[in-house]
Image: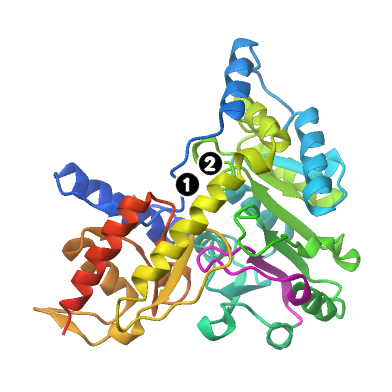
Amino acid sequence: MEPSKRVQSIEEPLTIGMSRRSRELSQQGIKVINLSLGEPDFDTPEPIKQAAIEAIQNNFTHYTAVSGYLELRQAICQKFKRDNNLDYTPEQIVVSTGAKQSIANAYLCLLNPGDEVIVPAPYWVTYVEFLKLIDAKPVIIKTGIETNFKVTADVLEKHITPKTKLIIFSSPCNPTGSVYSKEELEAWVKVLEKYPNIFVISDEIYEHINYVGKHYSIAQFESMKERVTVINGVSKGFAMTGWRGGILAGPKWLAQACDKMQGQFTSATCSITQKAMHKAMEIDVKTYVMPMVEAFRKRRDLVLKKLAEIPGIKFNIPDGAFYVFVDVSGLFGKRYGEREIKSGTDLCFYLLEEARVSIVPGAAFGDDNYVRISYAASEINLEKALTQIKAAIQKLQ
């Protein structure tokens, strides 16, 4: 007996794999600094935790509507109007067990086998792996530091074919931290207006972690209103990774389809999580979220300063999220003992063993010339980790 060909066709996320290897070393008594997972090291804000405690005490522990209870979806609509000037009704909102499920719902309800999906690279690991499960075809657009890892409108149009059904991207981006400006999105829209049958999934889970000003969504353009689904959630901006709360907002027909699909998979997400999400939609972002964002900004600057001391690598200044995507191709061909660095993956395993620091190969995101460093960790750990990385790289000849 063996697993299905379907599950054999996908890979375990390298982000999870590297984190698991770090835990294994830690269990052996080897201290590893983990900069591989995109998980804020902050605690969930107190008002959100209190809302969950009250939900338990008030016995809010029964099934809700598949898409989430009505008052929560109303609060999400108010958030979209307040923060993004987007008008949604509760019938256009589906609450899920994380942004990852929201994307899976959208894929399953939008795509057929053979459909082409444009995916700018670097991309979040699950975008492409899940396409394999449903026999859709990813069309990868490679980017680099020279364009701040962003796709221009003319390059986007060159990759559109009669089979193009969907475009998926994130802004702010995991793994690069790139943020699309209003003008850049507007240029995309002018192209997409020529192709009315192409749908867009806009992953905005890092919306609040933005160092350059106002967040813009491609859903804000009138001509795209019925052709975009916005993916969001509470894990990153509100330090609620373990709560598993995701949000999909889009045209009513898609929300209804996702409700139907989710009803067969998980039904509604945890009722307690829903109450916590409700409070997250209402709390003052300036009070509870912005202090975390400012801490991330300070950590980013610390990491960039330390990286600048390491020869043979290149990087840009991320505008959002909490990652630096580093070009390490200048180290290829260098050796330490019997070990030769031929890829980002090689370097990551070398650093895990030699520097005792866990980071993620760029291969996970579509380009093994790079590695991803997460700075969602304390300044003390970041300072120590980058010092150890520098020392290990200096050993390469």
Q: Which residue is mark 1?
A: 40
> In the rendered image, which residue does mark 2 sit on?
239
Residue at position x 47%, y 57% in the image: 298
Badge number at residue 213: none
Q: Is residue 17 magenta?
A: no
Amino acid type of the residue that numbered disc 2 sits on in the rendered structure? Ala
Q: Residue 216, position in %: x, y?
A: 75, 62
Question: What x and y, as percent, mark residue 247?
Answer: 69, 45
Question: Which of 344 and 282 lies nearest the eye of the viewer?
Answer: 282
- In this picture, which residue range is highlighted in magenta? 162-184
Taking the spot 43% from the left edge, 44% from the top edge, the residue there is 41
Front residue of 383/50: it is 383
Q: Residue at x 77, y 70 (%)?
A: 182
What element does badge 2 sit on? loop
Q: How many marks?
A: 2
Q: Is any atom of residue 109 visible in this view?
A: no
